[in-house]
Every structure is written in C-alpha cells, then in structure tokens.
Image (cartoon, grey):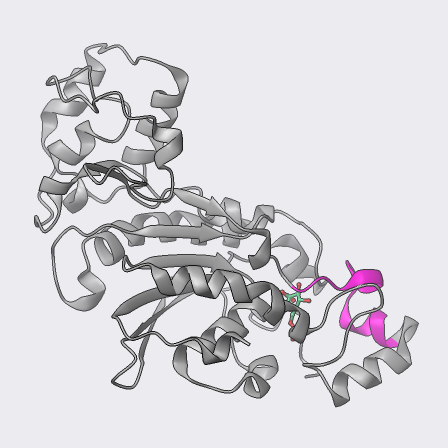
Amino acid sequence: QFLTVVHPTPHVIYLTRHGQSTYNQLGKIGGNSPLSPAGEEYARRLGAWVMPYVCYQQAAGLDSLTKTRLWTSSLQRTILTAQHIPHPIISEEDLGTPSVPPEPDADDALANGAALADPRQLAGRSSGLRGTPPRANGLRERLRSGGLSGVVGGVALGGIDLDSDRGGGGDRDRVWQQMAPRVYRNLDEIFAGECEGMTYEEIQHSFPSEAKMRATDKIGFRYPRGESYLDILARLDPLVHELESYHEPLVIVSHQAVLRLLYCYLTGRTRAQAPKLSMPLHTVIRITYDGWTPPTEERFYLGPECSQTDGQTHL
Ligand code: F6P
C-alpha cells in the first residue's frame, strides 16, 4: 500500500524501538509491560541524545536549531522511553541558531523562587530542562521551555494555548514546541491475539500448527484473534501519508515489527524483507531520503548493553 507513496522532498526520520521491556527480558511477546532497568537507562540516554543530535542536527554534522517532531505508540514502553526527551518552546527567531553553553541566570532565578504560573508550566519546565545537555541550554530557549516564560525576563508566549500547539506549530508558526509527544495506536506493536504474553516456546507448545504457519509465511500469518504484518501495513498507511506531508525531522519510538515495515518503506526495501530484519534495541536509526537520491542510513548505538534476542533465537 504505502510503498507507492512518493516523497520528493527531503526527510529525516529517526527510528528507535522502546528501551528493553520486562517482557523482552522474559522473552514474552506483546503485552504492555514497563521498561527494565536497562530500558530505563536507554530512555535517559535517548533524552540527552535527542537535543544535540536531532534538534541541533549534529547527526548531520551541523549545529543549528531546527523544528522537530516526536511520535510514540500508545503502549507504555514507548511512552516511558520518550519521557526524558525535552520539549521546550522555541520561536521562529531561534531557528538556525547554534547551541550555546548554559547561562546561569535562569536556574538562578528559579533557585531564587521565581513563581511558576500553573502545574502544566511546571511539567513543561522540568521536562524541558531535565535531560537537556549543557550545549543545548540556550537561555532564550530555556525561557521558552514552558515554565519560565512570562516569569523571568518578560518573555511572553502571547497567550498561545500550548495544548493546541502540541506536535507542531498548528496555524501559528511564531512558536513551536519541540518534540511535543504525539501518541498513535497505529504505531503499537503487532497484536498477537491469543498468543499475547507468551514466549515463542510456549506458542510452539500451545499452538503448534500456527507456529508452523507463521514460520512458513510470517508476513501473511495472522495470530489467532490477532494481527499479521499485512494488518500492520494497513494501519500504517494513513500515518505514512502524514509523515510524508511533514518537513521537520521526526523521531518515531515504536516496536520491532512496526519499525521493520517502516524501515523497509523508508529505505526502499520490499515488505517481504521486513519480518526478519534486525531491529536492535537501544539504537537510533537515522534515515534520510529525498525521493531523488538513494536513501542513506546511520545507526547510533546508545546502550546500555542488553540481550538483543527477545527470545527469538529460533528465527
Ligand atoms: O519480542 C518483542 C516483539 O516486539 C514482540 O512484542 C512482537 O510480537 C515481536 O517482537 C515481533 O517480532 P516477530 O514478528 O519477529 O515475532
């Protein structure tokens, strides 16, 4: 389906699986488990990595501020993985500026008891500053990170309703919330139906003929009361159209099967190649494409080390 969508403008997409989950540790599939300690550490590392490498484009060898987007699935392991990603408010005039060393004033003002207008601003402030690497802590950006605006330095957001601006600038391009998290059920992992929460060995034992069918036709096989890879393709279709309409670098935190399909689309591979592709944990894959030249790919392993098999040693 979406393999036929054209994409003639430059795009930069960052794909990452969630940090290791407790189900990953146990070799269980599906479910909605939280992160393991290693997965939590990945979330922290990702939160610190995103600002310099995505927002300031250091992954492209640049050092200038650009607008960015963030999508997660609706499952807690992706939302938890994205939890340390800062989402400060920036304005048009900030774009293109290099990252600058931190300036002490804003923190000093906070330490001095500068008032915060409401809890939403507090949430915005803490997520905007926590995890932000020093080089990305420009004062102007920090003032617009949601908490200090209107309080320190007189920087006002002009009554912008932040909620309506989440995920992009809407029709008001003056301000932009970086990495405003957008949650999509379309990005949820393949639903394994009656096999949810089982290990591959348990599936082999309880559903031997289904396990055989899946081994024969992994992309077309639909789990009992669950989904197939082809079903995921169908639900990714509208999302890919949306993705194609954006120009800002986009970070997608999702799951193995879903990312295999997106990766194949973005890199020009066939969907038949998807089900057995390697989609390692604790790694960000940066894909650039413009529809004219061959797509390029770069992988950033952030660690920490963890088992990469997910119980899939039999595949
Ligand atoms: O094991 C992690 C996981 O994301 C499972 O939740 C999911 O069922 C599986 O990977 C998808 O991979 P495969 O299609 O190879 O079984």
The residue nearer to you, when weighing 217 against 290, is 290
Q: Is residue 103 visible?
A: yes
Where residue 300 appears, as percent x and y from the top left, is: 34, 68
Point out the stretch of residues depicted in magenta. Answer: 190-204
Q: In the current view of this chain or complex, which residue is farthest to the front?
A: 171
The quadrant in which residue 220 appears is bottom right
Residue 29, picture quadrant? bottom right
Residue drawn where x is 12% and y is 32% of the image: 139
Q: Which residue is located at x 37 percent, y 14 percent?
A: 118
Q: Is residue 266 above or below residue 258?
A: below
Q: Is residue 193 part of the magenta span, yes or no?
A: yes
* Residue at point 40%, 17% (across, down): 119
80 sits left or right of 141 in the view: right
Is residue 174 left or right of 50 when viewed as pictured?
left
Identify whether 238 is placed above or below 122: below
At x 29%, y 51%, the residue is 68
Q: Judge whether 152 appears above or below 99 on screen.
A: above
Q: Quadrant of the C terminus?
A: bottom right
